[in-house]
Amino acid sequence: MFDFVSFIPRAIVQGIPLLLGSTGETLTEKSGNLNLGIPGIMYVGAISGVIGAFFYEQSAVEMNGFLAVSIPLLCSLLGSGLMGLLYCFLTVTLRANQNVTGLALTTFGVGFGNFFGGSLIKLAGSEVPAIVLSATSSYFCASLPFAGKLGWFGSIFLSYGFLAYLAVVISLAAAYFLRHTRAGLHLRAVGESPATADAAGINVVRYKYGATVIGSMIAGLGGLYYIMDYTSGIWSSDAFGDRGWLAIALVIFTIWRPDVGVAASFLFGGLYILHMYIPSGMNLAIKEIYKMLPYVVTIAVLIISSMRNKRENQPPAGLGLPYFREER
């Protein structure tokens, strides 16, 4: 029989990086910026947190829980925020092509992570090409102490680290911000028609910078969660996989609604690991077909989304287009 009690928690853990990445990208796209650099930004967020955790573990005589959590967290936010700032400087200030800039940031982010990750491996003198930060990871992975006593309920709902719950809160808060606040309305106006928003007195540049930098910081937390919680503090080069691209696809699947992204990310996380729970015997070809499910669903989502006719289900009208104020 299919073991839902063990499958659902693993699906949720798989989906949290996708949830943070898609939430950050949704905020960014609502400002009219199409940031294809999310995979690189998540990578930089992960390695920045690893750098902070590594040097803290090396220097600390006795681990302090608050510092063990706050140092990697702040480093991750700083690194991914700077990536978002760089993207805005190139696309908003210098008006570079958004698609090319995003792809360049992805390449740069992966190279940045592999370079500094390799450097830390040499500093640690590790015999394997990986860094193990188990002391720091134990604080990120810590769940509620009574979760194990509540059976399946505790396993499904209460067995996660604090970043998993924070990811859900961030997504719901982002949805509320976009729908029910004046600043959220201004942000959506900037994404739909920056010329009209500018004429109404809304600072287009400030909203584009703010949404993109904050969105990048949220996405960077997805990278930090993957390393500190999902892999239990183990960093190895090119281990993050294609989760950044799935996060971008998830934005389309959720029709630019962060609250819908909560359930959608867990669905994608379940599809990602479904091949481990469906019996396939010794037939490796069948197992590889199961591994294709997230990508098949992604393609189907792109096809279905292109057939939608409702305006509210479409991307912001100004998405990916540079804004020239002098042409207003």
Image (spheres, rainbow, N blue to C red):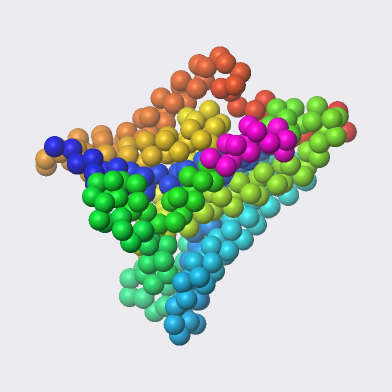
Q: Kindly tell me whether residue 96 is visible in this rendering.
A: no
Q: Among all residues in the image, which is located at the extreme bottom? A: 61
Is 136 situated above or below 262?
below
Is residue 70 among the parts visible in the rendering? Answer: yes
Residue 50, image x and y in percent? 48, 66
In terms of depth relative to the viewer, which is nearer, 66 or 239?
66
- Residue range (magenta): 172-185
Counting from the top left corner in percent of width and height, residue 75 is at 57, 64
Residue at the image position 39 percent from the left and 72 percent from the top: 135
Give how far across and how far down residue 63 sits, in percent.
44, 78
Looking at the picture, tell me which residue is in the foreground, 121 or 192. Answer: 192
On the image, the x and y values in percent for residue 177 come to 63, 38
Which residue corresponds to the image point at 47% horizontal and 30% vertical from the top-left? 253
Q: Nearer the viewer, residue 177 or 18?
A: 177
Furthest-left residue in view?
A: 281
Which quadrant of the rendered structure holds the C terminus?
A: top right
Q: Is residue 307 above or below residue 35?
A: above
Q: Residue at x 51, y 46 (%)?
A: 169
Looking at the rendering, in which quadrant would you find the N terminus?
A: top left
Q: Residue at x 54, y 67 (%)?
A: 70
- Magenta span has 242? no
**Dominant secondary structure (helix, strand or loop) of the stretch shown in magenta:** helix
